[in-house]
C-alpha cells in the first residue's frame, strides 16, 4: 500500500493505459479519480476499481472551463489532490505535406495544451497542500522523427519539455514532475492506428520483441508516484521494451 489514501487524478482513465494506471494506483491504496471526455466510460471504469470512495468526472482536458470544474470537484470532495497522471491523449497520423491545420490544432489542443491546463490547475492545489506528484504521458514519437507523426510527435515533444520546465519551477513547492514514454502498447488507440506493416516494423525494432501491455505502464506510474522515486525529478522514463535505446539489431 505505497499510496495509501493519496488522492490520484488520472485523465483519460476510462480505458487503455489510463485505466491500467488508475487500477495500479488503486491497488496501492490510492483514492482514484477517473476523468475522461467519455463520462459514462469514466463511471464504468471507477465501478471496476477496488475502492469505495472513487470519483468519476466528465472532463475535456482541452477546455479550460471543464478543467477548472473538474479540479474544483476534486477539492470539494477530498479537500486536496496528491497525484496527477496526465494521460489523456489522441493519436493522429498524416503525411507532413497533407496534414490539415484542423488536425494539427486538435492534436496540440488535447495532447499539449490539455496537459498544460490540467497540470497547472492541479499544481496550484498541490502547492497549497505541501506538494504532490505529476506524471505526464509522452511518447517515443516525441523523441525521434517518425513518418506521419508531425502533429502527434510535436505534441509529445512539447509535453516532454514542459515536464522539465515544470520540474524546475515546481520543486520548491514539493511537487515532483516526471514523464513516462510508453512504447507501442496494446490499446484501442493502437488497434486503430497500427496496421500489419507498422506491427512488423516494431517487431524488428524492439529488443524485447513484443508490444507492451497497459499494466507495464501502470507499474511505472506507481513507482513515479511513490516515495521510492522521491529524488527522481524532471525525468522521462521510457517503458518501451528497449525501443528507445536500440540501434542496429542484425547478427551480421
Ligand atoms: N498506446 C500506445 O502505444 C501509446 C504509446 C505512447 C504514448 N501513448 C499515450 O498514452 C496515452 C493513453 O493512450 P491509450 O493508448 O490508452 O489511448 P486510448 O485511446 O485507448 O485512451 C485514451 C483515453 O483518453 C480519453 N480522451 C481523449 N481525448 C480526451 C480529452 N480531450 N479529454 C479527456 N479525455 C480524453 C479517451 O476517451 C480515452 O478514454 C495517450 O496520451 C497516448 O498518446 C500511447
Image: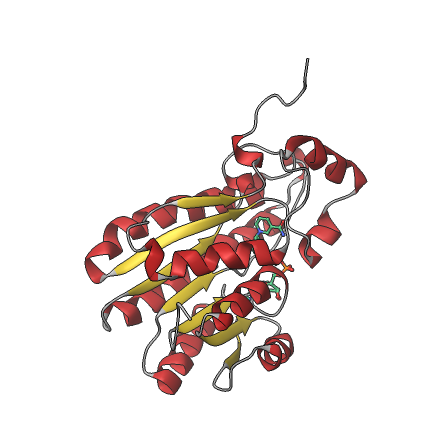
Q: Is residue 108 visible?
A: yes
Q: Which quarter of the figure is the N terminus placed in? A: bottom left
Viewer-side residue, 109 vs 59: 59
Q: Is residue 104 above or below residue 245?
A: below
Q: Where does the image place residue 23, in percent across and percent down from the top left?
A: 55, 69
Q: Is residue 209 above or below residue 118?
A: above
Q: Farthest front residue?
A: 1
Question: Residue drawn 51% across and 42% down?
Answer: 154
Q: Is residue 109 visible?
A: no
Tell me if 30 is positioned left or right of 98 in this view.
left
Viewer-side residue, 102 vs 110: 110
Q: Farthest right residue?
A: 196
Q: Farthest top residue?
A: 252
Q: What colour-coding does the image apply? A: secondary structure
Q: Where does the image place residue 163, in percent across and percent down from the top left?
A: 37, 49
Question: Residue drawn 39% across and 86% down?
Answer: 77
Picture quarter containing residue 150?
A: top right
Q: Quadrant of ligand 1?
A: bottom right
Q: Where does the image place residue 80, in percent across and percent down from the top left?
A: 32, 78
Q: Is residue 162 above or below residue 134?
A: above
Amino acid at each position: 500500500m505505497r499510496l495509501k489514501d493519496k488522492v490520484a487524478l488520472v485523465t483519460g482513465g476510462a480505458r487503455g493505459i489510463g485505466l491500467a494506471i488508475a487500477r495500479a494506483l488503486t491497488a496501492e491504496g490510492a483514492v482514484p479519480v477517473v476523468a475522461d471526455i467519455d463520462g459514462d466510460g469514466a463511471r464504468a471504469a471507477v465501478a471496476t476499481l477496488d475502492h469505495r470512495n472513487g470519483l468519476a468526472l466528465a472532463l475535456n482536458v482541452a477546455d479550460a472551463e471543464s478543467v477548472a470544474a473538474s479540479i474544483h470537484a476534486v477539492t470539494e470532495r477530498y479537500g486536496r489532490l496528491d497525484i496527477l497522471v496526465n494521460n489523456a491523449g489522441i493519436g493522429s497520423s498524416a503525411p507532413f505535406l497533407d496534414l490539415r491545420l484542423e488536425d494539427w490544432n486538435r492534436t496540440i489542443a488535447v495532447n499539449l495544451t490539455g496537459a498544460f491546463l490540467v497540470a497547472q490547475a492541479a499544481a496550484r492545489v498541490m502547492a497549497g497542500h505541501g506538494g504532490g506528484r505529476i506524471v505526464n504521458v509522452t511518447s517515443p514519437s516525441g523523441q525521434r522523427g517518425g513518418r506521419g507523426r508531425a502533429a502527434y510527435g510535436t505534441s509529445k515533444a512539447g509535453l516532454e519539455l514542459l515536464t522539465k520546465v515544470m520540474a524546475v519551477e515546481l520543486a520548491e513547492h514539493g511537487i515532483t514532475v516526471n514523464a513516462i514514454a510508453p512504447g507501442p502498447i496494446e490499446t484501442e488507440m493502437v488497434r486503430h492506428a497500427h496496421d500489419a506493416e507498422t506491427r512488423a516494423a516494431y517487431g524488428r525494432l524492439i529488443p524485447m520483441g513484443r508490444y507492451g501491455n497497459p499494466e507495464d505502464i501502470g507499474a511505472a506510474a506507481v513507482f513515479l508516484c511513490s516515495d521510492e522515486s522521491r529524488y527522481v525529478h524532471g525525468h522521462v522514463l521510457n517503458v518501451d521494451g528497449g525501443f528507445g535505446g536500440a540501434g542496429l539489431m542484425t547478427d551480421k
